[in-house]
Image (cartoon, rainbow, N blue to C red):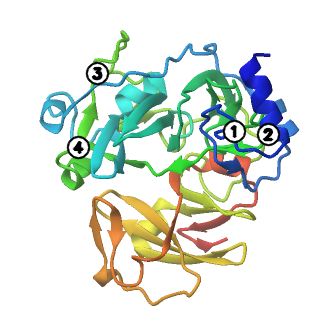
Amino acid sequence: MTLRLVVLCLALMLGVSPTLAGAALPTTSVAAVPTAHSLQALRDAVRSGGPGKDGIPAIDRPRFESAAQADAWLDPGDKVIGYHHDGVARAYPQRILVWHEIVNDVVAGEPISVTYCPLTGSALGFLRGDSELGVSGRLLNSNLVMYDRATDSEWPQLLGMAISGPLEGHGLEPRRLVWTSWKAWKTRHPESQVLSQDTGYVRNYRRDPYGGYNPVDGYYLPDSGRLFPVMAEDDRLSPKAMVLAFHNEQEAAAVELSALRRAGLLRLELGGRHYLVIHDPGLDTGWVFLDPQRREISRAGLSFGPEGVSGPGIDDLEPVQAFQVMWFAWVGLHPGTHLISEDGAR
């Protein structure tokens, strides 16, 4: 064990922040993730995904181009992962991320790791401090297991929590990413920068090894099979139905995207707290807010812009980290998830 890791472990034992200990790590606090599985059970369920550690190479020196330049090779219906922070908008095309899964970037001075797991259809952003995240080559419930290069701790993407290593039990600070089409993102953010195909690696960015989203094909088809076993199954939805997922310290929730589109605005109670979920028709995603007073909100008064959704009654509500993911992957980690589907709450 290196001297740096010894200092880090001592700091954690003494309850000192890893950042204050000089380790400059991408963590903020002990994680509060509701899961029926113990850390040992999670570790035991991790398995090889095929490629070894860094066999899927993260992009550590991303290059960007303008939206006009990207129009030459991106179709309007191509999927992108969007991020907006402090006036800077960036799009990370799925056709590039499927080959790399992680981009270690700096956006408006903020170091961030943009992460994408093709097998679970999930895109999540995390603050990374002075460290970087890499692809371990291992999976949990088909989901990407990341590692941080400062301590080699392992982090399943959907948990955002280290399940092994010096930072076990600690959580990454999340940042909201948006899974949408290139046309929708460019309409909302015409000044957006776009991750360039000039990644430093030789990959066929015109081909997705799993299938495709434009149109939907191969592994991404709703009725196609999984490639790896899961810790729990739940047939309330088709395994690959897309849901908007979030959690608090006690419970987890998932909203079927088709149900959210139809309703436009939904309310639910989770772990004794009240939440407001609003569909964004431009980006075809959802925004979640903690709504303790259960305010009267009208969709007619809402507007959708670069910062997301705004309007009377919600501008001072606390936003909640949420993301889109395939149902089987979410419920495998959070059995008993509170679900709102086309058939109602169940």
Residue 62 appearing in the image = yes
Q: Is residue 315 left or right of residue 143?
A: left
Please, what is the three-letter code of the amino acid marked with disc 2? Leu
Q: CA distance from mark 4 to mark 3?
A: 16 Å
Q: Are marks 1 and 4 in contact (CB under 8 Å)?
A: no
Query: Which is in the foreground here, disc 2 or disc 4?
Result: 2
**Of the image marks 2 and 4, the number of the one nearer the N terminus:** 2
**Of the image marks 4 and 3, the number of the one nearer the N terminus:** 4
Q: Secondary structure at mark 4?
A: loop
Name the residue tied to disc 3: 197
Q: CA distance from mark 1 to mark 2?
A: 7 Å
Q: Are marks 1 and 2 in contact (CB under 8 Å)?
A: yes
Q: Residue at x 59, y 69 (%)?
A: 340
Q: Secondary structure at mark 3?
A: loop
Residue 324: give its label.
Answer: none
Residue 18: give its label.
Answer: 1
Please, what is the three-letter code of the amino acid marked with disc 3? Gln
The image position of residue 130, as x and y in percent, is 53, 31
Q: Is residue 308 left or right of residue 190?
A: right
How crowded pointer 3 is (Cα within 10 Å; few <14, some 14-19, many 20+) is rated as: many
Residue 192: give its label.
Answer: 4
The quadrant of the rendering that contains the C terminus is bottom right
**Of the image marks 2 and 3, the number of the one nearer the N terminus:** 2
Q: Quadrant of residue 159?
A: top right
Please, what is the three-letter code of the amino acid marked with disc 1? Pro
How crowded pointer 2 is (Cα within 10 Å; few <14, some 14-19, many 20+) is rated as: some
Q: Residue at x 58, y 48 (%)?
A: 173
Query: Which is in the foreground here, disc 4 or disc 3?
Result: 4
Query: Which is in the foreground here, disc 1 or disc 4?
Result: 1
